[in-house]
Structures are given as C-alpha cells and as structure tokens.
Amino acid sequence: MTPDDPETKMFKSITHYGRIFIIVAVVVLSFEFVGMLYVSQQLKKTRKESTVLKEFVDSNLAFTTDLKYFTFKYGLLKNYLAQDANVAYYYQTVSDVFQSIDNQTIITHFTLDANRAFKISVGLPDYETSIHFLESLEDKTVVDHFDSLTITSFETAPAESGGLFVIDLEGTFKAQHGI
C-alpha cells in the first residue's frame, strides 16, 4: 500500500470524513444535552410555579366564595335602595299625624308604593272618637302632609276582633325633604 494507492486515498478520505462526522456528532450531541438540561430546569421551575399557584388558589377559594357572596348581597342592597319607597319615614309621619289627632288611633294596615301612593286602615275604639278623627282630617296640619287624601270606607269591625271602628284611607303623600 502506497500513499498514492487508491485504496489508501479512499481510506484516508473515509477516516477524514469520519473524524469530521464524529466531531459534528459530538458538537450536536453536546448542544442536545445542554438543551435538554435547560428544558429540564425550565420544566422543574414551571412545575414549581404551578404547584405554588394551585396552593394559592386552593387557599383563597373560601375567600373568593365569600367575596362573591358579599358582591351578590351588595347588589341586592343597591337594588333594594334604588326601589325603596322610604316606608319607614312615611309611616312615622302618618303615625305622628294620627297620634296628634287622637292617641287611641291604631294603624292596622299601611302600604306605600314608590310614587308615595298609600292605603291605610285606622282602628278607633268608639264612634265619637271616630267622628272626631274624621273631622280632624280636614285640619291644615294634617292636610299639609298629603297631595290627596280620600276616605274609602268607614265600618265597624266584629266584636270578636276588638270591635274597633275601622276607617280606610288612601291618597298620596307630598314629597318630604327630597324623599
């Protein structure tokens, strides 16, 4: 085998290309190994973050539920206040007016809508007190609280329910203090 022999040239060229191939393979495998290490570290880091986030969500689940419940109740309250007819204020007003007429007046029924329209049933102990009450409804101090006031009925209740004289009124309150 001589150096110029075609077999020797072929052997040298195969060994030369083989060395290049081995060097390229080692470099590629090194990059692959380094890449796999990097991906493995990133995967561990991501799993750890995922675990921390799951623990956070699990620990705050009760708080989230409470927050949703509070938000729901707050919405109901806002809705109620938007539709509130200020019944307590107007009930107290009519109660004070009727008590100033006669302290034996008993309000047995009271309804009020958002337009300040009302229906009231008033119980009085006897006929004379009832007549005095009806006459007093025309006083300026009483009329000043209402846009309209109408007597819809005047009757006696059965004796077993107390025997009160019942006067039913309906009408509309005047707007008071921006209410």
Image: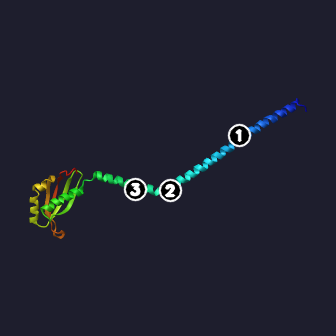
Q: Is residue 72 visible?
A: yes
Picture layout, residue 5 above or below residue 156 = above
The reply to whether callout 3 and callout 1 are in contact (CB within 8 Å) is no
Residue 134 position within the rendered picture, expressed as x and y whole percent measured from the top left: 10, 59
Picture layout, residue 159 above or below residue 173 = below
Instruction: Kindly give the residue lying farthest to the bottom in the view shown.
Output: 160
The residue at 10%/54% (across/down) is: 140
Q: Does residue 48 appear to the left or right of 151 in the view shown?
A: right
Q: Is residue 167 visible?
A: no
- Image quarter for residue 107? bottom left
Q: Does residue 162 appear to the left or right of 26 in the view shown?
A: left
Mark 3 crowd level (few <14, some 14–19, many ≥20, 10 Å Cα): few
Q: How is the image coloured?
A: rainbow
Amino acid type, residue under disc 3 in the picture: Tyr
Q: Which residue is mark 1?
A: 28
Distance from disc 3 to disc 1, alpha carbons, whole Å, reads 59 Å
Q: Which residue is mark 2?
A: 58
Mark 1 crowd level (few <14, some 14–19, many ≥20, 10 Å Cα): few
The reply to whether callout 2 and callout 1 are in contact (CB within 8 Å) is no
Q: Which residue is mark 3?
A: 69
Q: Earlier in the sequence, mark 3 or mark 2?
A: 2
- Disc 2, SS: helix
The residue at 54%/53% (across/down) is: 52
Distance from disc 2 to disc 1, alpha carbons, whole Å, reads 44 Å
Picture layout, residue 24 above or below residue 42 = above
Q: Mark 3 against mark 1, which lies toward the viewer? A: 1
Distance from disc 3 to disc 2, alpha carbons, whole Å, reads 18 Å
Residue 28 position within the rendered picture, expressed as x and y whole percent measured from the top left: 71, 40
- Image quarter for residue 74? bottom left
Residue 141 position within the rendered picture, expressed as x and y whole percent measured from the top left: 12, 56
